[in-house]
Image (cartoon, rainbow, N blue to C red):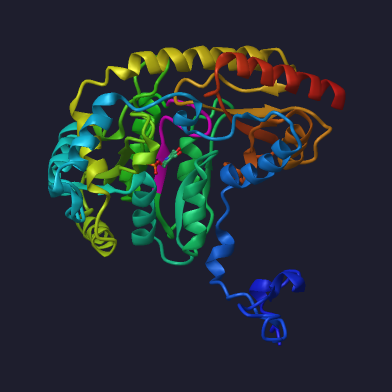
């Protein structure tokens, strides 16, 4: 008998029927099996950026052209990593030295190079499988159920998901209309269960770049409360105009600081899965010990790819000039599109390849309703804003401006027509 458990409530009973090998041939009755029960934490995992792709594929099957503006992977839009990186990986692939497990905390030369770039000691650098794994290790090391890590809203959804999976409480700080964090709100939201503050600069999903004075204020607040800052700086080489991005470690010597970075974005190599955490400031010995434990239990990051990362950060980043030029063309095309549609609004993104757009139309009750009907009717694919900002009022979407400029223009023509028809 199929036993109904909480985890499979709502699942069609027919979907639970399984034929065992030999059914029919041996005349055995079809058997019903309960779905394997899941841990509760799984229900907290949602990742709209990828979930919506399933729906887009269905629409694509109907013959409609999809304009993909959903994902921050430059390689899906014709960008590719610099050849000196791939050459270094090829060399490592041909060297049996790199076929074994790497030291768990990372390739010694890569750690040395990251430490130099981050102005810290090699022993305080941990190489992870993308910054994503570093974020996972940090949250696992810091959060007990009921605790909170202060997150930006809007922000990158992985942080919120990680917190919820670990039983953390949501705690978001607000940003201004220009998507700059509010120091007053950060101050207000810190409570006795707060374990850290996350700062994403330059920001995904908004493309905002934070000024020095604001970063200094955040560092001061963290210092006053003795809270570590997790500084996600994964887009720091991709500032498109204005002053270069300021890394938090240049503003504070003593505040406990974990700078997160990697080669996914700055070096256009997300598939390599190499990132790192670099510690600076005081009071992080135990946390560094915990990160080492997490590194040990998963043994190693792919060694050959780390050799590619070493080439990336020890060679002059000459690819950036052309990358910026291409991104600027696309960004300008995107902003032209925005200004052609009165019901859309977003501040100019000064970095990375994202925009967080407000939709001022009474026709849509929710952001999902807007995004899904836009997809159905026009084939333009963007991501609902609520995936990045559970606290924002109003309808927003996140779009990448990675497609070629002509495709961005086409997307806006379709969007303009769609919004006009909807009234
Ligand atoms: C703000 C931010 N942090 C971290 C990551 C994850 O980076 P990685 O590919 O190194 O895991 C992303 C990926 O999009 C991101 O946007």
Dividing the picture into quarters, in which one does residue 308 lie? top left
Residue 200 within the magenta-colored segment of the rendering: yes
* Quadrant of the frame with the N terminus: bottom right
Rendered-image quadrant of the C terminus: top right
Task: Give the answer, above or below, for where 301 lies relative to 24.
Answer: above
User: Residue at coordinates 36% horizontally, 59% vertically from top-left?
Assistant: 142
Q: Residue at x 13, y 42 (%)?
A: 121
Name the residue located 41 percent from the left edge and 32 percent from the top edge.
201
Q: Nearer the viewer, residue 131 or 119?
A: 131
Q: Is residue 336 left or right of residue 327?
A: right
Residue 423 visible in rendering: no
Is 400 placed left or right of 255 in the picture? right
Please determine whether, in this image, residue 30 is positioned above or below residue 198. below
Q: Give 3 or 195, whichever is nearer the viewer.
A: 3
- Residue 299, above or below 35: above
Q: Position of residue 301 (x, y in %)?
A: 27, 51
Where residue 407 appears, as percent x and y from the top left, is 62, 18
Residue 384 is inside the magenta segment: no
Percent position of residue 267, x then y:
33, 29
Q: In this orientation, does residue 412 appear?
A: yes
392 vs 338: above or below: below
**Residue at 49% over, 31% down:** 76
Please give the range of residues in magenta. Answer: 197-209
**Horizontal relation, residue 334 to residue 274: left or right:** right
């Amino acid at each position: 008998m199929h036993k109904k458990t909480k985890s499979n409530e709502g699942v069609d009973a027919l979907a639970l029927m399984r034929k065992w090998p030999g059914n029919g041939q041996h005349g055995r009755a079809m058997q019903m099996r309960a779905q394997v029960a899941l841990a509760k934490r799984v229900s907290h995992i949602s990742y709209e950026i990828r979930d919506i792709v399933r729906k887009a594929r269905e629409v694509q099957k109907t013959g409609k052209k999809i304009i993909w503006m959903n994902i921050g992977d430059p390689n899906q839009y014709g960008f590719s990593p610099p050849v000196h990186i791939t050459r270094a990986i090829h060399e490592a692939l041909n060297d049996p030295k790199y076929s074994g497990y790497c030291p768990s905390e990372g390739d010694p030369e890569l750690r040395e190079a990251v430490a130099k770039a981050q102005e810290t000691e090699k022993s305080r650098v941990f190489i992870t499988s993308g910054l994503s794994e570093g974020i996972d290790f940090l949250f696992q090391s810091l959060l007990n159920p009921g605790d909170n890590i202060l997150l930006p809203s809007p922000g990158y959804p992985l942080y919120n998901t990680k917190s919820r999976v670990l039983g953390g409480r949501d705690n978001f700080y607000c940003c201004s209309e220009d998507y700059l964090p509010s120091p007053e709100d950060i101050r207000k939201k810190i409570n006795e269960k707060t374990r850290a503050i996350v700062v994403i600069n330059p920001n995904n999903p908004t493309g905002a770049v934070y000024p020095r004075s604001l970063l200094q204020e955040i560092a001061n607040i963290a210092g006053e409360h003795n809270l570590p800052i997790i500084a996600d700086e994964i887009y720091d080489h991709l500032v498109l105009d204005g002053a270069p991005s300021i890394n938090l470690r240049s503003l504070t010597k003593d505040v406990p600081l974990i700078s997160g970075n990697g080669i996914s974005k700055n070096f256009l190599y997300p598939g390599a899965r190499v990132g790192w955490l670099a510690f600076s400031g005081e009071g992080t010995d135990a946390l560094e010990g915990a990160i080492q434990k997490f590194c040990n239990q998963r043994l190693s990051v792919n060694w050959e790819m780390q050799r590619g990362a070493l080439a990336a950060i020890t060679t002059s980043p000459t690819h950036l000039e052309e990358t910026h030029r291409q991104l600027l063309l696309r960004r300008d095309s995107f902003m032209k599109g925005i200004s052609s549609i009165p019901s859309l609004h977003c501040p100019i993104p000064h970095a990375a390849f994202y925009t967080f757009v407000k939709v001022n139309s009474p026709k849509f009750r929710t952001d999902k309703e807007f995004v899904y009907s836009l997809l159905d009717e026009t084939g333009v694919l963007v991501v609902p804003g609520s995936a990045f900002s559970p606290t924002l009022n109003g309808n927003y979407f996140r779009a990448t401006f990675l497609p070629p400029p002509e495709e961005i223009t086409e997307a806006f023509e379709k969007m303009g027509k769609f919004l006009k028809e909807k009234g």
